[in-house]
Amino acid sequence: MRFDVVSLFPGVFDSVLDYGVSARALDRGIVRFRTWNPRDYSTDAYQSIDDRPYGGGPGMVMLAEPLEAALAAARADLEREGLNPYVIYFSPRGGRLDQEKVLTLARKPALTLVCGRYEGVDERLLRQSVAEEISLGDFVLSGGEVAALALMDAVIRQLPGVLGNAASALEESFADGLLDGPCFTRPEVWRGVAVPEVLRSGDHAAIARWRLKMSLGTTWERRPDLLARRGMSSDEQGLLDEYRRERGLGDKAI
Ligand code: 9WO
């Protein structure tokens, strides 16, 4: 899979992609990555990439022209490999990113991520060149770069051959629409709190059931919206009832 990022601050990406799962995916050639700096494609003597907003107001707006030229350069480079990129812009105006969207994007051969700075990007560039606006949530960042990194991390770990079998993406939280329950490591007792007995029992079936029960319970407590969307089998309903009884929360309906 190929990522192209249009950003005024390409250095931001090195720091994160140099580590962990992303670094391994790049090393193995599963992921390829290039940045395109609109500054390198500005056409005036001052290398301008922004200008004052029509209608007045504070701050500056990114010019359409250098962004279009940077996008065209990325497109031309991709064209030579027969790739046609899906172009994304990051903004709180976009549709919320979730795991379903991540899996959809992971099937695309090339993603081009446009990162805004300052007060934003000339709307005409967005309408002309962007296929989709994506939001990470209802908050404001100083630029799209951190959002682009989050999306890349989430997509890369879904690509075949990136995670080992041990850490299969299919086994993770969200793969089955539930949150993860708690996890524990040594020591067996820490600050007077013991690790749940079942996890030290060696009974793998009992451990799997306990983990499912805790996942259901955690999702019910923290994200009832996820549980309502997903639904439960009667077996799972029974496990959740057990969780509620243990917590003294009764049999309140979702
Ligand atoms: C900022 C903004 C704030 C309120 C309503 C709409 C908005 N759009 C933008 C915007 O597009 N900002 C540009 C990108 C330029 C300034 C930095 N940018 C940005 C992206 N800030 N925050 C995001 C972002 C992206 C994804 N998920 C959450 C926030």
Image (cartoon, helix red, strand yellow):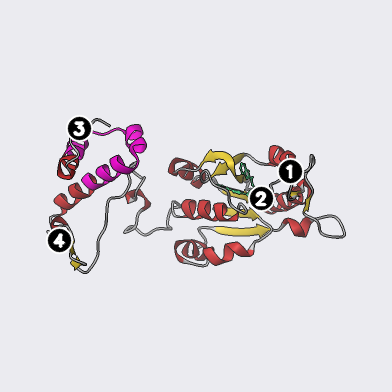
Rounded to the nearest whole Å, what is the CA distance between mark 2 and mark 1? 10 Å
Rounded to the nearest whole Å, what is the CA distance between mark 2 and mark 3? 47 Å
Question: Magenta stretch containing residue 228, yes or no?
Answer: yes
Indicate whether 21 appears above or below 84: below
Q: Nearer the viewer, residue 68 or 190?
A: 190
- Residues at badges 2 and 4 in contact (C-beta under 8 Å)? no
On whether ligand 1 comes within 8 Å of the CB at mark 3, the answer is no
Query: Which disc is residue 116 wearing?
Result: 2
Q: Secondary structure at mark 3?
A: helix
Q: Position of residue 241 (x, y in %)?
A: 18, 37
Earlier residue among tags 2 and 3: 2
Query: Which disc is residue 200 wearing?
Result: 4
On whether ligand 1 comes within 8 Å of the CB at mark 2, the answer is yes
Task: Look at discs 1 and 4 and give the one toward the viewer.
Answer: 1
Q: Residue furthest front?
A: 57
Give neighbour class at mark 2: few <14, some 14-19, many 20+ (Cα, 10 Å).
many
Task: Look at discs 2 and 3 and give the one toward the viewer.
Answer: 2
Q: Amino acid at mark 3?
A: Ser
Earlier residue among tags 3 and 4: 4
Q: Determine which residue is flagged by label 3.
A: 234
Q: Which residues are magenta?
A: 213-241
Rounded to the nearest whole Å, what is the CA distance between mark 3 and mark 4? 28 Å
Indicate whether 27 appears above or below 102: below
- Residues at badges 2 and 3 in contact (C-beta under 8 Å)? no
Query: Which disc is residue 122 wearing?
Result: 1
What residue is drawn where x is 72% and y is 40%?
Answer: 123
Q: Amino acid at mark 4?
A: Arg
Q: Is residue 124 left or right of residue 33?
A: right
Rounded to the nearest whole Å, what is the CA distance between mark 1 and mark 4? 58 Å
Give neighbour class at mark 3: few <14, some 14-19, many 20+ (Cα, 10 Å).
few
